[in-house]
Amino acid sequence: MKKILIMGLPGAGKTTLASKLVPLLNAKWLNADEVRKKANDWDFSREGRLRQAERMLKMADKFIKEGNYVVADFVCPTENSRNIFKPDFVIWVDTIKEGRFEDTNQIFKAPVTFNLRVKTKDAEKWSLEAYKLIKKI
């Protein structure tokens, strides 16, 4: 149980939650915007989003092979993108009903399965809750 996905709409609080959870787990952090910046790939088409999920998967798996926890915060808007990333633990940040990008709102599908559903913007509380659940498993 090492690959943790923090997913949800843009502006929901994924990065804030990740910033609190990463130190608790002493994890490597993959922030989708930083990964896109490094790859210089700002393509948000269907293909671009799947390419990003594959990129995040490769980076996460490398860190896991080195013995690390990995916390990845990215929208991961479709079941297909979540299946590509193959998380061990899913945190759905469900604090807003619409994000700031209409194209993302249109394709975003709520996850059917998840380990923790975050309903309020309280990163301190939810990071501790996530930590406890991750460490139990």
Image (tube, rainbow, N blue to C red):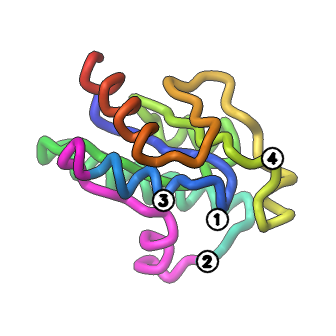
Question: What residue is disc 3 on?
Answer: 15
Q: Are marks 1 and 2 in contact (CB under 8 Å)?
A: yes
Please give the range of residues in magenta: 23-41
Q: Is residue 64 above or below residue 31?
A: above
- Residue 46 painted magenta: no
Instruction: Answer left or right for 50 relative to 2.
Output: right
Q: Name the residue tied to disc 2.
A: 42
User: Which type of secondary structure does the marked residue at label 4 adopt?
Assistant: loop
**Badge 4 amino acid:** Lys
Q: Residue 55 placed where, x, y %? A: 44, 59
Closest to the camera, between mark 3 and mark 1, is 3
* Between marks 2 and 3 in the image, the one whose residue lies nearer the viewer: 3
Residues marked 3 and 1 touching at CB (< 8 Å): no
Looking at the image, tell me whether mark 2 or mark 4 is earlier in sequence order.
2
2 and 3 marks in contact (CB < 8 Å): no
Of pointers 2 and 3, the one earlier in the residue sequence: 3
Residue of label 1: 48
Residue occupied by mark 4: 97
Seen at 68% across and 24% down, the residue is 112
Query: Three-letter amino acid code at disc 2?
Result: Trp
* 14 or 125, nearer to the observer: 125
